Image: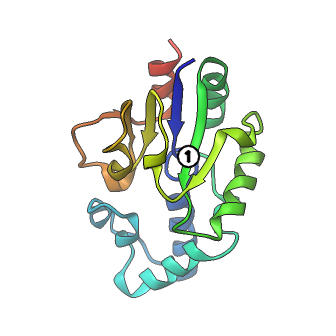
Amino acid sequence: MERIIIDMDEVIADPMGDMIDWYKKEYGGDVDWDKMLVGSWLKGFPEHHQAAIQERLLSPGFFRHLPVIEDSVDVLKELNKKYEVFIVSAAMEFPNSLKDKLEWLGDHFPFLTWKQIALTGSKDLVYGDYMIDDHVKNLKGFKGKPYIYTAAHNLEVTGYDRINSWKEAADIFLK
């Protein structure tokens, strides 16, 4: 059975959307989408508020209640029948996220077992036939077929086949 490695943040969970909504309510401001293109959506927030954004990212509970990316649940449920699916999230950068992410996955993707979840510091440890991720740094050394999942911070990235939505992923993997 072929194996698909799937990232969590900005691929099946929406921390950026949640943070933008919070920021607008908390500060009444907006983000600069063009600054996000430099590789981090954090840079899209005004510089004088970036410490508050970083603090919220590091706080317990932030990753626990994130919105789910549209269609990801239904498509992953079908992928799980046809492929060996693993959710691999680089969670060590945000240590408080470990429990949050595990519980979030249990709530939204109950068809995945704990053996299909890897919360790690480096995705270089994983192998598979396909990887879907929003960061080039995770796709670079991958030995299988990499797909970049479209996010605000990677719109200008080239050199990878791109997946813009989970409906597109279904068209690729569930034919």
Q: Residues within 10 Å of mark 1 (few under 14, many from 20)?
A: many
Question: Which residue does the image show at 73% across and 44% down from the upper left?
Answer: 108
- Residue 14 lies, in percent from the top left, at 55, 54
> In the rendered image of this protein, does residue 23 appear above or below residue 105?
below
> Quadrant location of the N terminus?
top right
Relative to the observer, which residue lies in front, 111 or 45? 111
Question: At 22% from the left edge and 38% from the top edge, which residue is drawn?
Answer: 159
Furthest residue to the bottom? 48
Left or right, 169 with respect to 148, comes to: right
Residue 49 placement: quadrant: bottom left
* Location of residue 141 with respect to 161 vertically, above or below: below
Give the residue at the far front of this rendering: 125
Q: Is residue 121 visible?
A: yes
Snapshot colouring: rainbow
Relative image position of residue 171 (x, y in whole percent): 47, 19
Front residue of 25/2: it is: 2
Q: Quadrant of residue 86?
A: top right
Q: Residue at x 32, y 49 (%)?
A: 136
Q: Is residue 70 above or below residue 4?
A: below
Please name the amino acid that badge 1 sits on.
Val
Is residue 70 visible in the rendered structure shown here?
no
Image position of 110 (left or right of 97): right
Image position, residue 106 (x, y; %): 76, 46
Locate residue 104, reporting x and y percent.
71, 53
Q: Reply above or below: 154 against 35.
A: above
The residue lying at 40 percent from left, 70 percent from top is 42
Q: How many marks?
A: 1
- Per the image, label 1 sits on a secondary structure element best described as strand
Q: Which residue is mark 1?
A: 88
